[in-house]
Amino acid sequence: MAMILLVEDDRIVAAALTRALVDAGHVVRGAAQAVDALRIVADERPDLVILDLGLPDIDGADALRMMRSVSDVPVIVATARRSEVDIINLLNAGADDYVTKPFSGGHLLARIAAVQRRGRPVAEEAASITVGSLVIDPQRREVRLDGAPIRLTRREFDVLAYLAGRVGRVVSRRELLTQVWQQDRIGEEQTIDVHISWLRRKLGETAARPRFLHTVRGVGVKLVEPE
């Protein structure tokens, strides 16, 4: 069971989704405007947010960026936008996942379950992993580079930790999608590219001048110890 914030201004859609969520055992908090949603995220700390982009007061994409400034709560965006550029922009803005309209309650529940699985903490007995000057602590979900902490999002950490557990081995985008995202949707591999790009920036490297994350063209990516 999770406390879910449903941000949807269409009363009929909100009522149908609320029924599906409640029937699945979740507690639902509703908001019809972005301003109310932001206040609830800051004050009540929901476990997950379902965010419609077509809100009456603030564009949903802008609301998503505002949420990310105050919280790391998982956000599933509901959108009618289907182009690859739009989806990448939403992921860049901080969305954890998305559903394209129209969608069923069952489809949404499956996405919620997938996001919740990704957010489960790594087993406490997991030991820290050191790769050169990079230290990943799965138990505390902390990363340090050259002795300084690096702030990663939940999914950035999960990707890095997965690669760190396979140092020197090339991991395909499809493997990351199925093992870290626990999804197998053809055409969604650009999600991996976005998160690898974010990780590179935070690790102080680029695709052209990699230090830890090396792309093997046409195969995948591997984490290596710098020479």
Image: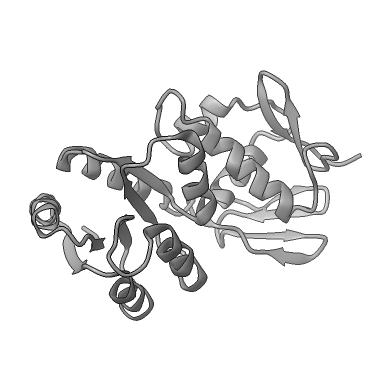
Q: Residue 108's quadrant in the figure?
A: top left
Task: Locate residue 157 relative to residue 167 in the image: left or right.
Answer: left
Task: Locate residue 4 relative to residue 223 in the image: left or right.
Answer: left
Q: Against 15, is 114 above or below?
A: above
Does the rendering let one see residue 46? Answer: yes
Does the rendering let one see residue 125? Answer: no
Q: Count the marks.
A: 0
Q: Looking at this rendering, what residue extends furthest in the front direction?
A: 56
Residue 10, x across and y down, in percent = 15, 58
Residue 218, x across and y down, in percent = 67, 18
Task: Locate residue 54 relative to residue 125 in the image: left or right.
Answer: left
Q: Looking at this rendering, what residue extends furthest in the right direction?
A: 227
Q: Residue 1's quadrant in the figure?
A: bottom left
Q: Against 11, is 34 above or below?
A: below
Q: Which of the two residues, 178 or 32, is positioned nearer the viewer here? A: 32
Q: Residue at x 29, y 47 (%)?
A: 112
What colour scheme governs how the chains and residues are painted in the rendered image of this protein? one colour
Residue 8, x across and y down, in percent = 22, 60
Q: Against 164, is 94 above or below?
A: below
Residue 72, x across and y down, in percent = 46, 64
Q: Which of the two residues, 79 or 168, is positioned nearer the viewer here? A: 79
Task: Locate residue 215 relative to residue 42 in the image: left or right.
Answer: right
